[in-house]
Amino acid sequence: MSITQPAEHAALAPRPTRRRRLRLSPRLVSLLQVGPLGIVLIAFFALPTLIFLVVSFYDYDRTGIYPDFLLDNYRELLTSPATLRLYLSSLQFAFIVWGITLFLGFNIAWFLVIHVRTRVMRTVLFLLCAIPFWTSGIIRTIAWIPFLGRNGAFNSALMDLHLIDRPLDFLLFSPFAVCVTYVHLFTLLMIGPIANSLSKIDPALLEAARDAGASRWQTMVEVVIPLSKTGIALGSILVFTQVMGDFFVVKQMSGGQSASIVSALATEIQAMQYPPASASAMLLVLFVALMVAGMMRIVDIRKELVR
C-alpha cells in the first residue's frame, strides 16, 4: 500500500502564511534614534534655559521676586563696568589656556598617532594621559595647593637645589596658578579630538609631501593642520566652554585676586538675587554660543565629521 498522498490532496493542503515586516520610513527611524537625546536636551537644557530667560525679566527686592517684564536687569548688567572686567578676565584665561592646551594637545596627539607604531602601546599611553581624570576635578584642583604653596614641594625642591634663595610667591593664589590648573584639567579635552583627526590622515600623503621636497614645517602647515582642523575646532570648543563656565578653579587658585563671570553669578545666587543672576546666565549662554558659532563658521564640523 502506497503512503504517498494524491496530487490533488497536496494541492489542497494549507500553505504557510508569510508575516509582513513592518517597514518604517527613514524619517521616522531618524526621529526614533534622536528622540531620547532630544527629550533629555529639552528636559535638562531647553526648559531650564527658558525659565532663566523668563526670570531674567522679573523684578525683585530683599523679600522676593515678582513677575514682570522689565529690562532693568539687562540694562544694569550691560552698562556696569564690572561686567566688562569680568568678561575680559574670563577671556584672558580662556585664550591663554586655549593656546597652551592646543600646543601640548597637538604635540602629544601627534606623538601618539604618528610616532607610536603599535596600537597596544598607543592605547596604554593614552590611558596614562587619562588616569588623572579618573578622580574628581575638585581633588585634582586642590592637589596643586600643597605643590605650588610657599612651603610646597616645588619651592622646597628649588631651594634644596640652591636655585632660589627664598620661596616664589607667584606660584600659588595668582593667575599663574589658575592657568596651570586649567591646563592640567583640560589638556586631555584637546588631545582626544586632535588624535582622532590625525588618525584619519593617510600616511601616504605625508610620504608624498616629503617626496615632493616639502620640509617638515611645510608638511605640517599645508597637509597636517588642514586635515586635522576638525579635531582642533572640537578641542577648542571644549576648552573654551569649560573655562568660560568655571568658577571653582578661579576661586580656589587665585585666592580671591581674580574673578570670573560664573563666580559673580554664584555670588548673586547666594544673595538670592535671582533675576539679575538669570540675566547674567543668559548673557553668558549667548556669548558662548556666539563664540562656538564663530568657530563652526571657520570649520564646518558637521561636514567634516560626515567624511
Image: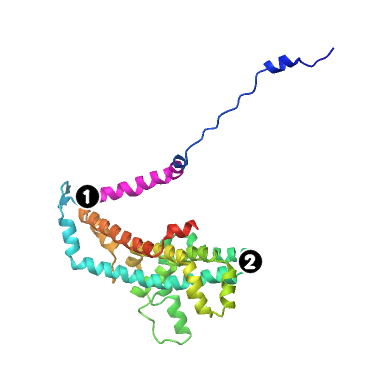
**Which residues fall within the magenta stretch?**
30-53
Q: Name the residue that disc number 2 marks.
A: 118
- Circle 2 packing at 10 Å, graded few (<14), some (14-19), many (20+), is few
The foreground one among 54 and 295 is 295
Tags 1 and 2 touching, CB below 8 Å? no
> Does the rendering let one see residue 246?
no
Which amino acid lies under the numbered mark 1 shown in the image of this protein?
Answer: Val
Q: Name the residue that disc number 1 marks.
A: 55
Mark-to-mark CA distance, 1 and 2 = 55 Å
The foreground one among 264 and 207 is 207
Residue at 30 percent of width and 48 percent of height: 48
Looking at the picture, how far across and down is residue 132, in whole percent?
Answer: 49, 64
Looking at the picture, how far across and down is residue 82, in whole percent?
Answer: 21, 67
Rendering quarter of residue 297: bottom left
Residue at 47 percent of width and 80 percent of height: 157
Question: Would you say the magenta stretch is mainly helix, strand or loop?
Answer: helix
The foreground one among 16 and 270 is 16
Which amino acid lies under the numbered mark 2 shown in the image of this protein?
Answer: Thr
> Is 194 on the left-hand or right-hand side of 66?
right
| Magenta stretch contains residue 49 | yes
> Is 201 on the left-hand or right-hand side of 101?
right
Looking at the picture, how far across and down is residue 130, in whole percent?
Answer: 51, 63
> Which residue is farthest top?
1
